[in-house]
Amino acid sequence: MVPFQMCKLPMTHPLMQPHTIRDMSWRPQYRSSKYRHVFGKPATKENCYDGVPITRSVHDNHLCTVNPRFIAVITECAGGGAFLVLSINHTGKVDPHHPRVSGHRGNVLDIKWNPFNDFCIASCSEDTTVKIWDIPEHGVLKNITVPRKELQGHSRRVGLIEWHPTANNIIFSTGYDYQVMVWKLDVPEQVIKNPLRSISVHSDVVLSMSFNTDGSRLATSCKDKKIRVFDPRTGTLLQETNCKSHKANKVLFLGNLKMLLSTGNSRWNHRQIALWDQEDLSQPSYSEDLDGSSGVLFPFYDPDTHMLYIAGKGDGNIRYYEISPEKPYVHYLTEYRSFLPQKGMGVMPKRGLDVCSCEIFRFYKLVTIKSLIEPLSMIVPRRSESYQEDIYPMTAGNKPSMTADEWIGGLDKGPVMMSLRPGSKLDSYVELGSGKDPTDSMETQHSRSRPGLSLLIQERLDAKEGNARKESPPTSLLPSTDEKSSSTTYVSNGQLDSMHCSPPKTENELRQMFYKQQEEIRRLKEQLNQKDVRIKQLELEIKNVRNSQANL
């Protein structure tokens, strides 16, 4: 054997080549993300809902639905079915005799708030009906037993309901008769017996339904472990999985990424997530085994931050990921852990979040072992308490983009977008062609805010503000439409909203923005002081006029 010292390798051998950074491909590739350090913050005991008799139903639904005004949860009751509607601020101990919505003759299986009306909720039950309820503005003060609409069409119990994401007064339901039914609600009849369409493409019970962003595609998962994508308007089946390695249980459209995510079980009965191309469901683009537990995995997706949350039924933990359109698609971030297992989950719409604390998602965990509903906030850690434009892009608002008749006629539109910036008009967008001046509501509010002033002072102030309004552009929420873009942009204070205002990238830009803000604050303070001085001058003038009239 030749000693090592006497071995002479040629200079072309890889071991004789100089090592560069490019050769060190084994080094881990770190991915930069603003959501890497997102953490879950559970609410304190005072901010939870305690003493809620959560249903003991084994149905694998969320069992809870939330909007910025109310939280609704399916409850346990003897005889018939009921659910509880509480004000979102009604935290603490809940009265065991609190009034409920109890018009069903069988157990309630699913409830969903209308995305365009915070006082309208739909429910489905084992009594084969779907019912639409109107909730009073001040909450449920007495038992509600008479619905606004009752939908009768299913022959067996109804297990799932889903509102159309962009069309008003369109709701979908599916039951144990394997039918998916489309209903139109803006009709004069109180009891609707004939749906718009009944879609018969499933061979077993439908386990979940999910729309894409504009509502032109509907994805379903079925008890036969298949995923189907079809046109919700015509019922035409477009895609269907035939994969043996993944048995799907829940399915979800991932915003505008043209991808589907499903949760289910692998061939070895491990809990698994899979990613699919919505145009090709032959094989998953990505799959990952999570653990060997048996609880159903509930997926939740935030299209604004591209974050995916996976919560298991009976688990206390919530995993969250970031989704990208390029490989490897799914990037694990971290995991929230808790000793309290969840039976179901509710999710607050983005317009109900606390943007000042950098909250990007909020769950409402149903903890049956303690009869507790626990809010859980997902927060991006930031030192500043000001509005963070980079984590709050334009999001889907609470205004429908089309009527039911327009959707039935073949129209597809994306959601009407809104800004989450504090102070922007969240619930009062002004539509083009409405004939209203956006400053009308400002004037009305301004005149009501100072009822103690005399008519003369009010007229002079209004005249002065009218001149000032002519000089400066008014605050506008008019949507600017672009033929090349299907989204809608709102203008506030003469500038485009957060989607078009990029944050400062250099220290010099940050300093300039700071100086501009300081100048704006100084100018507003001067205007406020001048207005107070002017009010005092006018009051003195009125006193002088009255004194001169009294002397005459």
Image: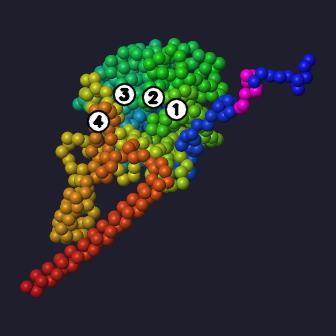
The numbered dot on residue 323 is 1
Q: Which image quarter is the N terminus in? A: top right
Q: Which residue in the protein does label 2 denote?
A: 257
Question: Who's the residue at 28% across and 42% down the image?
Answer: 479
The CA distance from mark 1 to mark 2 is: 9 Å
Amino acid under label 3?
A: Gly
Q: Earlier in the sequence, mark 3 or mark 1?
A: 3
The CA distance from mark 4 to mark 1 is: 28 Å
The CA distance from mark 4 to mark 3 is: 21 Å
Q: Which residue in the protein does label 4 denote?
A: 482
Q: Residues within 10 Å of mark 1 (few under 14, many from 20)?
A: many
Q: Earlier in the sequence, mark 4 or mark 1?
A: 1
The CA distance from mark 2 to mark 4 is: 22 Å
Q: Secondary structure at mark 4?
A: strand
Q: Earlier in the sequence, mark 2 or mark 3?
A: 3
Write down the region rendered in magenta.
12-19
Q: Looking at the image, do the residues carrying marks 1 and 2 touch, with CB atoms under 8 Å apart?
A: yes
Q: Earlier in the sequence, mark 2 or mark 4?
A: 2
Figure quadrant of residue 532: bottom left
Q: In the image, is residue 14 part of the stretch drawn in magenta? A: yes
Of residues 396 and 145, the one drawn nearer to the viewer in this rendering: 396
Q: Position of residue 103 (x, y in %)?
A: 38, 34
Q: Position of residue 54 (x, y in %)?
A: 52, 38
Q: Earlier in the sequence, mark 4 or mark 3?
A: 3
Amino acid under label 4?
A: Asp
